[in-house]
């Protein structure tokens, strides 16, 4: 039996186990997906131990995504983003990857643009933390012109300096940034624990595709405001799904059963 899993602290809330195990069941793979919650000081030892025990792959979540860069061999994208969320043990040494960027772009392309290219679009990313970094790099690599807005403008500007062609701003500039944009992504946690949004509804319009990285709840205030303005909306569960799909396909070399994984995910969000 193959073993895959998630390492983080805490991980009890994670929806990854049922999503991945639904994929194993759909394809008849003899595997399990388990969670690991090491003490933060023991993260490197946990990864080394997983490798020694024959674990095939790990997803990585808070607070270890940046720590993983020093423990495994990160690929070029993970190195640029500055975070690893997927570890692959199948090579000569553990390698690190970032499927958050891939997941965000695929969610937007398939559920906001009907499979069309994002090349040439203008995207506004709200938030300059870990999720914001992944989304900004993913969109830039997909050909979008990226504008990053953050509560602290200097942090947005610093991130923009590392993302090809990106520019950074404070939140007060959001209305102007959105006026001619085609994509808006909330990459902050605002809307998760309270019915709030960082985006003034008056700045939303029907030419936008709006994605919220928050997936609990699925219908955030931002997405409700966007729908009311006539924008197309993409909930956060799609980004979660597709980052998991990318990890599954990297680990197994098989095409992921996306429908089965999505069904398992959406029965629990």
Image: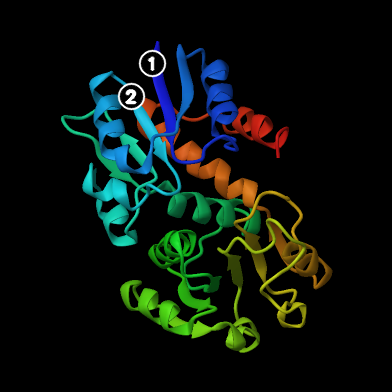
Are discs 1 and 2 less than 8 Å apart at CB? yes
Which element carries disc 2, helix, strand or loop? loop
From the top left corner, tell me how far across and down residue 146 is, in percent.
47, 75
Which quarter of the rendered picture does the N terminus lie within?
Answer: top left
Q: Is residue 65 above or below residue 204?
A: above
Camera-side residue: 234 or 48? 48
> Does the rendering let one see residue 253?
no
Q: Residue furthest left?
A: 92
**Tag 2 residue:** 56
From the top left corner, tell me how far across and down residue 48 is, in percent.
24, 30
Residue 41 occupies which quadrant of the picture?
top left
Disc 1 to disc 2, C-alpha distance = 7 Å
From the top left corner, tell me how far across and down residue 190 is, in percent.
65, 64
Which quarter of the rendered picture does the C terminus lie within?
Answer: top right
For this view, does 233 lie left or right of residue 160?
right
Check residue 142 in the rendering and tell me which mark sits there, or answer none. none
Q: Is residue 13 above or below residue 239?
A: above
Residue displayed at 54% across by 78% down: 151
Which element carries disc 1, helix, strand or loop? strand
Camera-side residue: 104 or 11? 11
Q: How many marks?
A: 2
Q: Residues within 10 Å of mark 1 (few under 14, many from 20)?
A: few
Q: Residues within 10 Å of mark 2 (few under 14, many from 20)?
A: many
**Tag 1 residue:** 2
Q: Is residue 188 above or below residue 238?
A: below
Camera-side residue: 151 or 91? 151
Residue displayed at 45% across by 48% down: 62
Residue displayed at 62% across by 81% down: 178
């Amino acid at each position: 039996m193959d073993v895959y899993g998630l390492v983080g602290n805490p991980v009890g809330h994670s929806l990854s186990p049922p999503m991945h195990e639904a994929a194993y069941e759909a394809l008849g793979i003899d595997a399990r997906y388990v969670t690991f919650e090491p003490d933060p000081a023991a993260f490197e030892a946990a990864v080394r131990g997983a490798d020694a025990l024959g674990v095939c792959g790990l997803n990585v979540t808070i607070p270890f995504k940046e720590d993983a860069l020093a423990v495994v061999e990160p690929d070029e994208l993970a190195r640029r983003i500055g975070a690893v969320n997927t570890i692959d043990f199948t090579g000569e040494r553990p390698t690190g990857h970032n499927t958050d960027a891939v997941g965000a772009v695929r969610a937007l392309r398939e559920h906001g643009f009907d499979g069309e290219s994002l090349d040439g679009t203008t995207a506004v990313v709200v938030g300059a933390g870990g999720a914001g970094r992944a989304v900004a790099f993913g969109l830039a690599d997909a050909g979008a012109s990226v504008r990053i807005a953050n509560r602290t403008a200097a942090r947005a500007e610093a991130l923009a300096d590392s993302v090809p062609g990106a520019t950074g701003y404070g939140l007060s500039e959001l209305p102007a940034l959105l006026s001619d944009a085609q994509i808006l992504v909330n990459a902050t946690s605002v809307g998760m624990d309270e019915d709030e949004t960082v985006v003034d509804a008056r700045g939303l319009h029907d030419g936008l595709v709006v994605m919220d990285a928050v997936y609990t709840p699925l219908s955030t205030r931002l997405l409700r405001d966007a729908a009311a303005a006539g924008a197309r909306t993409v909930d956060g569960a799609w980004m979660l799904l597709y980052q998991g799909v990318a990890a599954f396909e990297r680990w197994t070399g098989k095409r992921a059963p996306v429908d089965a994984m999505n069904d398992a995910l959406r029965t629990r969000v």
